[in-house]
Image: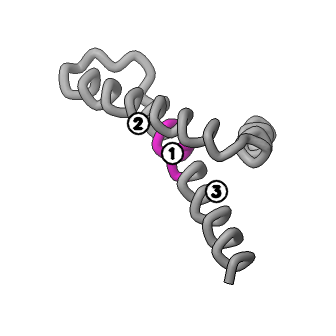
Amino acid sequence: MAANKGKKDDLKVATDDQLQTQLIELKREQFNLRFQSATNQLEKPSRVREVRRTIARIKTLQHQRARVAQTAQG
């Protein structure tokens, strides 16, 4: 659980561009993991879950930041 806390903190201090870049990389990795899973070549099945959850964390942060920016404007 402590390792997840560090990852969350890392994401929170990342800039919007860094988050977007990381999101693209994770989606690419998720795509590759799905192919490995389909061909039974997946070495670490838990990685699928980690990637999916990290993508969700990034999207949540992006949505929160967009809402804060929208509130600040209007």
Q: Earlier in the sequence, mark 2 or mark 3?
A: 2
The residue tagged 3 is 61
Instruction: Name the mark on residue 73.
Output: none
Q: Earlier in the sequence, mark 1 or mark 3?
A: 1
> Mark 1 against mark 3, which lies toward the viewer?
3
Instruction: Name the mark on residue 27.
Output: 2
- Assess whether mark 3 and mark 2 are in contact (beta carbons under 8 angstroms): no
Magenta includes 64? no
- Residue type, numbered disc 3: Leu
Q: Which residues are magenta?
A: 51-56
The residue tagged 1 is 55
Tell me what residue is drawn at x 53 percent, y 46 percent: 53
Question: Label 2: how many residues lie within 10 Å, few (<14), some (14-19) or many (20+)?
Answer: some
Is residue 50 among what the camera can see? no
Disc 1/disc 3 C-alpha distance (Å): 10 Å
Question: Considering only vertical position in the picture, is 15 above or below 73?
Answer: above
Q: Position of residue 40 (x, y in %)?
A: 23, 20
- Assess whether mark 2 and mark 1 are in contact (beta carbons under 8 angstroms): yes
Tell me what residue is drawn at x 41 percent, y 27 percent: 29
